[in-house]
Amino acid sequence: MMIAVIPKGVYNMSNRYVIINENAKKYQKSAKKIKSQLLEELTPTLHMNRQYLASLLRNSGKKVFKRGNAVVVAYPTLRELSKRGRRSVYGRDVEEALSVIWPLTGFASSKHLVAFIRLNWEMLFKHEKLSLISPTSSLGT
């Protein structure tokens, strides 16, 4: 007998958090035996790691303290539950400029890319795609 609730018309990989939210209350209130059965049913269905799925079911709908502020997790993702990773340093304009410059260098490493930009500064900003970006941006510094 299946314990997990999978709503009709919901099963695709982009909406799997709906399935998690449907089963979260049952998981949080049930005994250990039922929790393990829920995990055994949902792990192959959602194609998620068992421990990760258990943490999503545990934290769904609860307050999680993130950088000192209480956040209610409705659709828990890694972004709400973890502080891992780096924040983006550069803006969209710099990323667009680098997407044009990087192929010109033959996809060089970051150190070589910086040297290439500093040596060819005047030539690069005469390029039609890069003329929109001001040379005073944080690209060459």
Image (tube, rainbow, N blue to C red):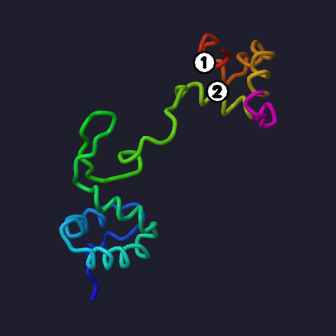
**Residue at point 33%, 76% (across, down):** 36
> Relative to 79, is 93 on the left or the right?
right
Label 2 sits on a secondary structure element that is helix
Distance from label 1 to label 2 (Cα)? Answer: 8 Å
In the displayed structure, 27 sits above or below 137; it is: below
What residue do we see at 75% from left, 20% from top?
A: 117
Sequence-wise first label, 1 or 2:
2
Please state which amino acid type lies under the numbered disc 2.
Answer: Ala
The quarter of the picture where the C terminus appears is top right
The disc at residue 89 is: none
Q: In the figure, is residue 119 to the left or right of 59? A: right
Q: Is residue 60 above or below residue 68?
A: below
On-image quarter of the N terminus: bottom left
Secondary structure of the residue carrying numbered label 1? loop
**Kind of residue sitting beneath label 1:** Ile
Q: Are marks 1 and 2 in contact (CB under 8 Å)?
A: yes
- Tell me if 80 is positioned left or right of 139 in this view: left
Q: Which residue is mark 2?
A: 97
Residue 8 seen: no
- Residue extent of the magenta highlight: 103-111
Image coordinates for residue 95, horizontal then vertical, percent: 59, 30
For label 1, the residue is 133
Q: In the orientation shown, which residue stands out farthest toward the front?
A: 32
